[in-house]
Image (cartoon, grey):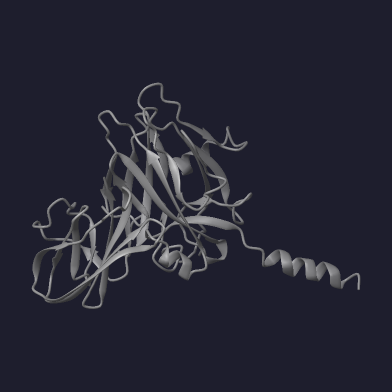
Amino acid sequence: MKKIIPLIMLAVSASFAVKIGVMAPFGGTVCRSYGGEYLAIILDMEDSKNKSSVTGDPYPIGFRLADGNAYFSLCKMDDWYLKKVPYDYVVFRMDYACPSGGIKFRRHHDSEDDRNKNGTLYGSPSPTLINDNADMEFCLMPGTTGARNEFPLDGEFGVYANYVSNTVAHSIVRIDDENSKNRNSWNWYGRDKDKTFQTRVKRIVNDADKDTYYHMIRKLPLLAKKTSETEAGVDNNAFVNKSATTDVRGFDHSTVSFELKSAGNAVITIANVNGAVVSRISKENLEPGAHSVEWHSGVLPNGLYIVTIKHNGTVSSKGFVLK
């Protein structure tokens, strides 16, 4: 009996999952399909001469800049979904400890002081703390030599990494934090003299000009580089879904604007940040080209909404802020 007990304890310990947070599509449907818990937070960025931006892939999964704010859409899930890859990457720390081999660190955002709108839109991102400022808790997951060169997760998710390939899209997100008396900082959790570790982190989550820069990547199934110069407002080095047949262009209290690449029926769904559908509109026999469909927001509050259009077997989504 004395020999059996340690074996049972070892089996329980080996199956124990550590919670992590990864970038996920707004609304939470994809997250919940993996048994995860959906989270969404907002950071209020600098009001004066805001320089926040997204370069590279213009639509990183789970992140939007809108109305002077940064919106993060996250999935809290078990770490056993992670794969070993040859490059470093970063996930949100959602547990006391990081996954095996991971190293924790914190990025403190000194957010906008005037009329601060920082907050949690859905769920609790603990131990990340969001108040007038934000303490973002992360885990650096070191690359594994000899591992397969792929994305560290299956499914429609994103992580932080300074890496790009023909199957991975790379974005650099600039968060313009408070300019006046800025107190951005790091917590290295006892590794203050470990410059090698800090350098590896800062290749992915960097600081410069009182701002914070996040390198984000997402998987690119069926995607390829855009070559058309007629797609206004999109970087020529960005990536687009080759199979997508619609592009959501605009959204306000009365209309949804989109462009179809082929004829067919379209179903337009509008959901709030919690994933609740507030409107669904069906249109049949639409011709290719630009369209504007009326809807009525009624007494819906201002805030972030996700517009999804299903057309000819494909789905396109984009986040917008009603104001």
Q: How many marks?
A: 0
Q: Quadrant of the C terminus?
A: top left
Q: Position of residue 186 (x, y in %)?
A: 51, 34
Please state, as top left, top right, bottom left or bottom right, where the N terminus lies in the image. bottom right
Nearest the eye: 17 or 316 = 316
For this view, does 263 lie left or right of residue 84? left
**Figure quadrant of residue 202:** top left
On the image, the x and y values in percent for residue 27 come to 39, 60
Where residue 124 sits: x, y (%)? 53, 50
Q: Decide: is 53 above or below 283.
A: above
Q: Residue at x 43, y 31 (%)?
A: 110
Horizontal and vertical percent for residue 121? 43, 49
For this view, does 54 lie left or right of residue 147? left
- Look at 23% across and 62% down and name the residue there: 240
Front-lying residue, 10 or 87: 10
Q: Taking the image as drawn, is residue 154 in sight?
A: yes
Image position of 48 with respect to 238: above or below: above
Among all residues in the image, which is located at the extreme right? 1
Describe residue 319's horizontal placement relative to residue 86 as left or right: left
| Residue occupying the point 16% across, 61% down | 294
Farthest residue, direction top = 181
* Side of 204 relative to 193 (left or right): left
Q: Is residue 185 above or below residue 11?
A: above
Report whether residue 162 is seen: no
